[in-house]
Amino acid sequence: QFTGGLMTPSIGGDVYGWGANDFGQLGTGSRRSANVPQLVPVLRNKEIAWLSAGSEHALAISSAGLVYSWGRDQHGQLGIGNADYNSCDQSGTDPNCLGIERGYVLYPSGVGALRGERTYQISSKRDQNLVVVQRGVSYGWGLNAVGQLGTDDLVDRTLPTEVARSF
């Protein structure tokens, strides 16, 4: 559950969202709110095993351990970095940029920095996320104003960054 919207996986692993959608946090490809559950088309047949949501963004993990993110990206909480926005021509003709607008992503997009990792668990809060991958390593990204990412600094991260180990 997150501000103004709800997400739920179905028995078959598809994902549905409804409620407020000001920043594309429902992942349906628009910014229109929905009064009834709407299928998140990009995640159809992806066998989503885990969902987590912050204030105005959401993440999903597939049964294969792939991570998808969508919604608002004010502090880098989507984990896609700034380069992805800059490489899009905004004309809507590039299929890799479909649904990307400055500051938010309307469709689930793969978190490329985690490619090659099998992600098992994810936790999203207001504007930040933490994940645990198969190797037992944790990564954080997004808002880090009070050190909530565990990276031993106060710098927001737009890409997943390994959590500092102090033990």
Image (cartoon, rainbow, N blue to C red):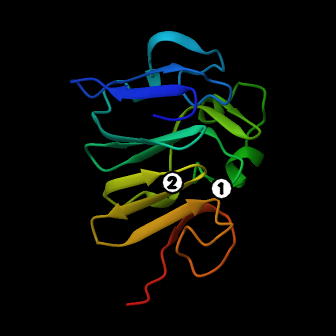
Give coordinates of residue 29: x percent, y percent: 59, 21
| Mark pair 1, 2: CA separation | 9 Å
Q: Which residue is mark 2?
A: 112
Mark 1 touches mark 2? (CB < 8 Å): yes
- On the image, numbered disc 1 is attached to which residue? 81
Give the residue at x 31% y 58%: 118
Q: Residue placed at 53% from the left, 21% from the top?
A: 28
Q: Position of residue 6 (x, y in %)?
A: 46, 26
**Frontmost residue, 87 versus 114:** 114
**Secondary element at image label 2:** helix
Q: Is residue 129 visible?
A: yes
Viewer-nearest residue: 15 or 1: 1
Q: Position of residue 148 (x, y in %)?
A: 56, 67
Which quarter of the rendered picture does the C terminus lie within?
bottom left
Given the image, on which type of amino acid does mark 2 rest? Gly
Task: Tell me the kind of residue under disc 1.
Answer: Gly
